[in-house]
Image (spheres, grey):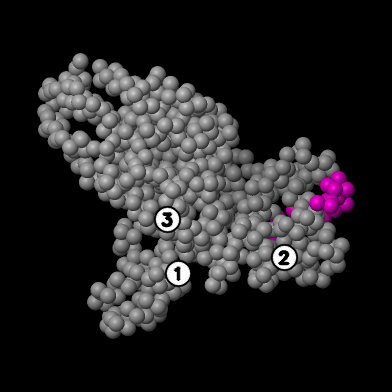
């Protein structure tokens, strides 16, 4: 009953709102699923109408598209597709162990990570224009950052590995960088390391900074040889602060050139929330802005205990297993997609 | 008149290619022998080769310099049509090492000119600025070359002379390593020469067919890395486990021993692991899974290749390294 209800609602939604075809969609591979994220793939569309008809027809719970462009996107196996290039995508997924279906704190943290990647790495270090970057809420637990730029389409997988290592600060060789005499206003990791050094020079009680004023001045000039063992001390502190300095991306999405990821403007069948490009990331709240269904009451029976959760500024629950309740359609959809209720009518 | 010495040293530059436009492939037959020599040379490369070559070229007349440019172009075709990965890599390594040596002994202007035939370079405040994507696609081997350890600002990496020369080497290497040409595009004489050349080569490096007992020291770096991750108790993703399982199946590692590798996993379940391995070994379905190719492993983000990786498939790596060890 629940699956039928979900599919009906998805159909209605796609009829009402339609799906926005991703840029250059004719060259991309699509994959869909109801049970799993991908039950079948190697699908391609020639027109936006065809794509929309598909969604109204099949109303898949999960819909993904390739970050890669192909000459023949529907051919099998992968080698036959004729790889033409791939967008650059970063993923941040909330790691939430809290006992709630709508963990605003965890998603907010994930959002802040995404903002950090953009503001501290992609724009200043990699030189991308804000216009080339798009952020989407994945519809469930995370955010995707797309770089739609000709400059990145032909990055090979080794290059993408380098980029991931860069933003995560992997294999960072602090001692080597200190030998290049970075100053606090140096760009990229050079500046990050110098600023960390400056910070500890101002606050640490180490012997290295006995003459604090002089130490601060020397570090500001990129001099790290005034105290034996200073480099090791800085290295230790950079490593300790790595989590704060680096961006914690989920690397597999960036590295996998044949990855399929959720299509913005479609509904995530594991949550009923809309996967959508986000214009104003600062004020975006997925449990408010990605809720797209309506208010008419729907009768449901709980399949498990559910603690309190909030959608669209309204809070529900807690509920006990076996309890039968009438809830607004959007809340019923959310719970049904989470497999927490059975829809009764 | 083009600078022939420059063209002979850097046969991939625009100037050198310009020179080659005048040459007709089927008339270059007499130089094929020189090209064959050049390919064979790559297999016995020694550090003194670029030193000697530079001496030779610096004292050579126009004819010899010109022939050197042509023999490079022909050698590249011989290797490119061969489909012989080892030859491609050896040739790329030898030629790019020569270029790296020439660049180190040449002037800064020369370095800049040569670099610019491969990617755009700006010179600013004593640094060479290269677009990050050109750098990232060709990152040279070594810790200090990793993108995270070079200065990156507004999309450009800041390189000194030494690093730029290394980048040129690496970009030239990649260009050669990625080059292939169809037989239909070549005259008969070149195809024949290539076939003969590599027939000899193939029999010289005898393939080690029987895998025999497992030799763990011959495992490729990607496999060693997955094993060390498993051993450290890190929760290892499905793809990595798949790669390892198929690799073990391919080298006939006894299933009992294969199971042991997964024991340190936090969610280790012997029954499931065994079931899963039996599948990979083809004991369930009769179809043994093949270990993914290097390019697939690369696309999974699991490739940690180093200078020992000369082949297209981890299994070939293992076979060759093992046979080398046995011979020793």
Q: Earlier in the sequence, mark 1 or mark 3?
A: 3
Q: Secondary structure at mark 1?
A: helix
Frontmost of labels 2 and 3 is 3
- Between residues A230 and A114, which one lies in front from this camera angle? A114
Which residue lies under the disc numbered 1?
A: A176
Magenta region, residue range: B21-45
Task: Give coordinates of residue B149: x percent, y percent.
Answer: 46, 63
Q: Which SS does the magenta portion mostly show? A: helix
In the picture as drawn, the residue positioned furthest to the top comes out as A345
* Residue that carries the numbered disc 2 in the rendered image: B49
Quadrant location, the N terminus of chain A? top left
Q: Residue at x 84, y 43 (%)?
A: B189
Numbered disc 3: secondary structure:
loop
Q: Secondary structure at mark 2?
A: helix
Instruction: Check residue A123 in the rendering and tell me which mark sits there, or answer none.
Output: 3
Image coordinates for residue B211, horizontal then vertical, percent: 57, 41
Q: Is residue B244 left or right of residue A6?
A: right
User: Where residue B78 sits in the image (x, y, percent)?
Assistant: 76, 47
**Eyeballing the image, is A8 above or below A28?**
above
Mark 1 neighbour density, 10 Å: few (under 14) some (14–19) many (20 or more) = some
Q: Identify the chain of the residue marked 3, using the numbered disc in the image.
A: A
């Amino acid at each position: 009953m629940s699956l039928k209800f979900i599919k009906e609602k998805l159909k209605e939604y796609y009829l009402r709102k339609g799906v926005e075809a991703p840029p250059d969609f004719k060259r991309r591979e699509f994959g869909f699923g109801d049970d799993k994220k991908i039950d079948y793939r190697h699908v391609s569309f020639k027109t936006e109408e065809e794509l929309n008809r598909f969604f109204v027809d099949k109303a898949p719970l999960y819909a993904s598209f390739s970050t890669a462009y192909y000459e023949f996107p529907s051919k099998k196996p992968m080698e036959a597709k004729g790889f033409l290039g791939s967008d650059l995508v970063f993923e941040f997924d909330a790691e939430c162990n809290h006992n709630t279906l709508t963990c605003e704190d965890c998603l907010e943290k994930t959002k802040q990570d995404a903002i950090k990647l953009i503001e501290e790495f992609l724009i200043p270090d990699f030189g991308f224009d804000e216009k080339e970057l798009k952020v989407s809420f994945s519809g469930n637990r995370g955010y995707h950052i797309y770089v739609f730029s000709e400059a990145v389409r032909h990055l090979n997988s080794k290059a993408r590995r380098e980029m991931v290592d860069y933003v995560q600060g992997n294999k960072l060789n602090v001692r080597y960088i200190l030998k290049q005499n970075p100053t606090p206003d140096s760009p990229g990791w050079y500046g990050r390391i110098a600023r960390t050094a400056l910070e500890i020079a101002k606050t640490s009680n180490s012997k290295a900074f006995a003459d604090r004023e002089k130490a601060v001045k020397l570090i500001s000039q990129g001099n790290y040889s005034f105290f034996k063992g200073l480099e090791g001390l800085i290295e230790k502190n950079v490593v300790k602060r790595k989590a704060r300095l680096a961006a914690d991306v989920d690397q597999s999405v960036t590295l996998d050139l044949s990855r399929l990821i959720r299509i913005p403007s479609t509904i995530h069948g594991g949550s009923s929330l809309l996967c959508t490009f986000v214009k104003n990331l600062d004020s975006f709240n997925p449990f408010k802005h990605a809720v797209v269904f309506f208010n008419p009451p729907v009768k449901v029976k709980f399949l498990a205990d559910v603690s309190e959760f909030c959608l669209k500024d309204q809070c529900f629950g807690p509920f006990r297993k076996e309890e039968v309740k009438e809830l607004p359609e959007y809340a019923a959809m959310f719970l049904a997609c989470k497999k927490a209720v059975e829809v009764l009518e | 008149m083009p600078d022939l010495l420059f063209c002979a040293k850097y046969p991939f530059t625009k100037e050198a290619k310009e020179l080659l436009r005048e040459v007709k492939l089927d008339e270059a037959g007499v130089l094929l022998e020189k090209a064959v020599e050049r390919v064979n040379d790559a297999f016995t490369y020694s550090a003194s080769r670029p030193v000697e070559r530079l001496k030779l070229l610096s004292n050579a007349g126009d004819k010899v310099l010109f022939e050197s440019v042509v023999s490079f172009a022909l050698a590249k075709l011989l290797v490119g049509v061969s489909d012989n990965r080892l030859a491609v890599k050896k040739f790329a390594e030898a030629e790019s090492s020569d270029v790296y040596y020439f660049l180190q002994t040449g002037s800064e202007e020369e370095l800049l000119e040569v670099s610019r035939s491969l990617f755009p370079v700006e010179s600013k405040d004593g640094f060479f600025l290269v677009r990050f994507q050109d750098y990232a696609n060709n990152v040279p081997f070594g810790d200090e070359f990793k993108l995270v350890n070079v200065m990156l600002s507004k999309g450009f990496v800041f390189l000194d002379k030494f690093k730029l020369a290394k980048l040129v080497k690496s970009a030239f290497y990649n260009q050669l390593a990625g080059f292939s040409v169809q037989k239909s595009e070549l005259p008969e004489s070149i195809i024949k020469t290539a076939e003969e050349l590599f027939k000899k080569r193939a029999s010289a490096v005898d393939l080690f067919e029987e895998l025999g007992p497992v030799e763990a020291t011959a495992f490729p770096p990607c496999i060693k890395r997955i094993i060390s991750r498993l051993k450290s108790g890190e929760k290892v993703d499905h793809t990595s486990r798949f790669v390892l399982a198929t690799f073990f199946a391919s080298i006939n590692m006894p299933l009992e021993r294969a199971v042991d590798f997964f024991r340190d996993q936090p969610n280790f379940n012997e029954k499931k692991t065994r079931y899963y391995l039996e599948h990979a070994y083809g004991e369930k379905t009769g179809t043994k899974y093949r270990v993914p190719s290097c390019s697939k492993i690369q696309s999974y983000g699991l490739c940690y290749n180093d200078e020992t990786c000369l082949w297209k498939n981890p299994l070939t790596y293992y076979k060759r390294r093992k046979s080398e060890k046995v011979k020793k």
